[in-house]
């Protein structure tokens, strides 16, 4: 059996987001139920991959060591909740860098798919922003919007969205496991 995957955005989906950026492990705080969602997906045989824009690096707000510390904390807390994050893919570029990896472009999705020989048409991708959904759609994945983070505002600004919408990533995880 081939591995099954779910892609999660980070800020606003797994952890509390901030317009001032999450710049340190101390500032990184999980949203209620988000790490339990990782554990639930794992229990049903899904590997969880995080795909995240991290332009705070390009903006000079934090460095790779700080980013790695945030991710170490995220992984440790996921383990404590009974889950495991398989891989993390980040775009460190700014919005004006015109890279291929910054969402809404699908470069990180494509890199993940190549690394894991994953069929993106079978992969749900959960996020809270329009660019998360656009990247998933462009890559051929199955987008899901959550109302946490920027999600409620994304839905308000784009009521025509054609994808499942859930209150939280935990609710989205329940939907995904019910489909498997």
Image (spheres, rainbow, N blue to C red):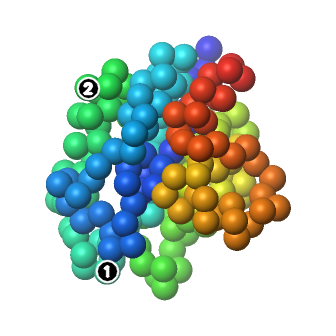
User: Measured from the top left, where is residue 116 in percent x and y?
Assistant: 52, 36
Task: Tell me the residue at 37%/54% (across/down).
Answer: 16
Contact? badges 1 and 2 (CB < 8 Å): no
Q: Is residue 139 visible?
A: no
**Callout 1: SS:** loop
Res. 19 mark = none
Question: What's the CA distance linking mark 1 and mark 2?
Answer: 32 Å
Task: Tell me the residue at 43%/34% (across/down).
Answer: 33
Residue receiving disc 1: 59
152 and 106: which is toward the camera:
152
Q: Residues within 10 Å of mark 2 (few under 14, many from 20)?
A: few
Looking at the image, is 92 positioned above or below residue 115? below
Which tag, 1 or 2, sits closer to the chain's start? 1
Q: Is residue 84 visible?
A: yes
Q: Quadrant of the C terminus?
A: top right
User: Measured from the top left, where is residue 72 in percent x and y?
Assistant: 22, 43
Which residue extends farthest bottom?
96
Task: Tell me the residue at 22%/70% (across/down).
Answer: 62
Please name which of the two marks, 1 or 2, marks the residue nearer to the observer.
2
Q: Quadrant of the N terminus?
A: top right
70 and 148: which is toward the camera:
148
Task: Tell me the residue at 58%/34% (across/down).
Answer: 171
Location of residue 119 by image quarter: top right
Residue receiving disc 2: 80
151 on left or right of 28: right
């Amino acid at each position: 059996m081939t591995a099954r995957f779910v892609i999660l955005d980070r800020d606003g989906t797994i952890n509390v987001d901030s317009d001032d950026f999450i710049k340190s492990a101390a500032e990184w705080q999980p949203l209620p139920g988000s790490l339990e969602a990782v554990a639930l997906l794992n229990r049903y045989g899904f590997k969880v991959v995080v795909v995240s824009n991290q332009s705070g690096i390009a903006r000079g707000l934090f460095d790779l060591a700080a980013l790695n510390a945030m991710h170490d904390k995220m992984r440790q807390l996921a383990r404590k909740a009974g889950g495991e994050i398989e891989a993390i893919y980040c775009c460190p570029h700014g919005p004006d860098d015109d890279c291929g990896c910054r969402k809404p472009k699908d470069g990180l999705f494509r890199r993940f798919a190549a690394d894991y020989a994953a069929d993106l048409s079978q992969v749900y991708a959960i996020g809270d922003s329009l660019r998360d959904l656009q990247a998933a759609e462009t890559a051929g994945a199955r987008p899901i919007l959550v109302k946490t983070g920027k999600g409620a505002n994304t839905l308000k600004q784009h009521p025509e969205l054609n994808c499942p919408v859930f209150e939280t990533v935990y609710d989205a995880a329940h939907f995904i496991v019910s489909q498997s």
